[in-house]
């Protein structure tokens, strides 16, 4: 089983990455011949002011979405794990946002938030009737909210699975000692979910680097460049400006940032995420 998995990883992971790395040292408009360019593409990408702005927006979206998603996902996951009766139904219900395409979600929210024909105008609610996608701060908040709406159910299911792995004997011992629900949550549930939190956070952080289609359809990086993340900057450079070399350099930077963040989270967590969490193991 290892060799087929390794072959798939090399074919669909390593080979494309090596191809992009090779393109980052060339000059190509996407149509004509490819010419070696040494470090020119890297120099062009690294001296472009938009790169660092896009990197900053990417980190901002990443941090805000993590802060928004993690506590809500954790609480919903714990709540779902304690309700056995409707667990299956809720699990199916919570998977619905993941079945929708990001483009469809973006189009729907764009229509709902339209200041002239959207939800606010239809219900005549002044608080909702704002130019949500026309102001920089509001547009960034909308992006974070929509991303969180799409992925909170997925992370809630991860936390639900993690809570169900905690031995019941630990909760029974806490009840005998007189611990309340809040004390049990902070002294048993939360510590036992340490590796689950690391796994969920890694998926959130690394996954936020790939946000493209939702932001492209929802705001196109605007207003101005307020929501222009690095993946969108890569697309604009490669397919709008026809600079495949610098776009490939940005893609390599994305991979390096994602790899660095994943290793950092693993180090912060301490030990191996594959260590057993079972009592006495």
Image (cartoon, grey):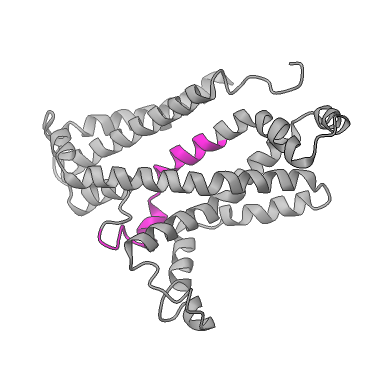
Residue 261 screen position, x and y as percent: 41, 31
| Residue shown at the point (48%, 63%) measured from the top left | 104
In magenta segment, residue 219: yes
In magenta segment, residue 203: yes
Q: Is residue 223 visible?
A: yes
Magenta span: helix, strand or loop, mainly?
Answer: helix
Q: Is residue 154 visible?
A: no
Considering depth in this image, is 38 or 66 the residue closer to the camera?
66
Q: Outermost residue toward the right?
A: 176
Residue 45 screen position, x and y as percent: 18, 39
Residue 151 screen position, x and y as percent: 54, 49
220 up-or-down from 19: above or below: below
| Residue shown at the point (71%, 34%) measured from the top left | 189
**Number of marks:** 0
Considering depth in this image, is 104 or 280 the residue closer to the camera?
280
Residue 264 screen position, x and y as percent: 44, 26
Which range is magenta?
A: 200-224
| Residue shown at the point (76%, 50%) measured from the top left | 88
Q: Outermost residue toward the front?
A: 178
219 up-or-down from 15: above or below: below
Q: In the figure, residue 63 lies in which quadrant?
A: top left
Left or right: residue 47 compared with residue 152: left
Considering depth in this image, is 175 or 96 the residue closer to the camera?
175
Q: In the figure, residue 171 lies in which quadrant?
A: top right
| Residue shown at the point (54%, 47%) measured from the top left | 69
Left or right: residue 77 compared with residue 57: right
Left or right: residue 28 compared with residue 178: left
């Amino acid at each position: 089983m290892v060799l087929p998995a390794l072959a798939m990883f090399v074919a669909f992971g390593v080979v494309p990455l090596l191809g992009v790395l090779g393109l980052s040292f060339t000059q190509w408009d996407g149509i004509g011949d490819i010419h070696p360019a040494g470090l020119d593409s890297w120099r062009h990408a690294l001296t472009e002011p938009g790169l660092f702005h896009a990197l900053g927006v990417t980190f901002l979206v990443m941090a805000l979405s993590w802060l928004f998603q993690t506590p809500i996902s954790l609480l919903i996951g714990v709540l779902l794990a304690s309700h056995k009766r409707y667990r299956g139904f809720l699990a199916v219900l919570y998977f619905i946002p993941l079945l929708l395409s990001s483009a469809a979600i973006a189009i729907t929210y764009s229509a709902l938030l339209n200041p002239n024909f959207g939800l606010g105008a239809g219900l005549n609610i002044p608080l909702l009737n704002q130019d949500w996608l026309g102001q920089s701060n509001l547009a960034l908040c909308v992006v974070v909210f929509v991303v969180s709406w799409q992925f909170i159910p997925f992370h809630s299911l991860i936390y639900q699975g993690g809570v169900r792995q905690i031995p019941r004997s630990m909760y029974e011992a806490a009840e005998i000692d007189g611990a309340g629900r809040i004390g049990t949550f902070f002294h048993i549930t939360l510590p036992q979910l340490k590796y689950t939190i690391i796994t969920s956070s890694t998926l959130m952080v690394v996954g936020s680097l790939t946000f493209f289609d939702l932001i492209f359809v929802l705001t196109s990086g605007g207003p101005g460049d307020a929501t222009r993340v690095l993946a969108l900057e890569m697309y604009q450079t490669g397919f709008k400006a026809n600079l495949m070399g610098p776009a490939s350099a940005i893609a390599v930077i994305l991979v390096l940032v994602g790899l660095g963040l994943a290793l950092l989270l693993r180090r912060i967590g301490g030990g191996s995420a594959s260590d057993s969490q079972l009592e006495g193991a």
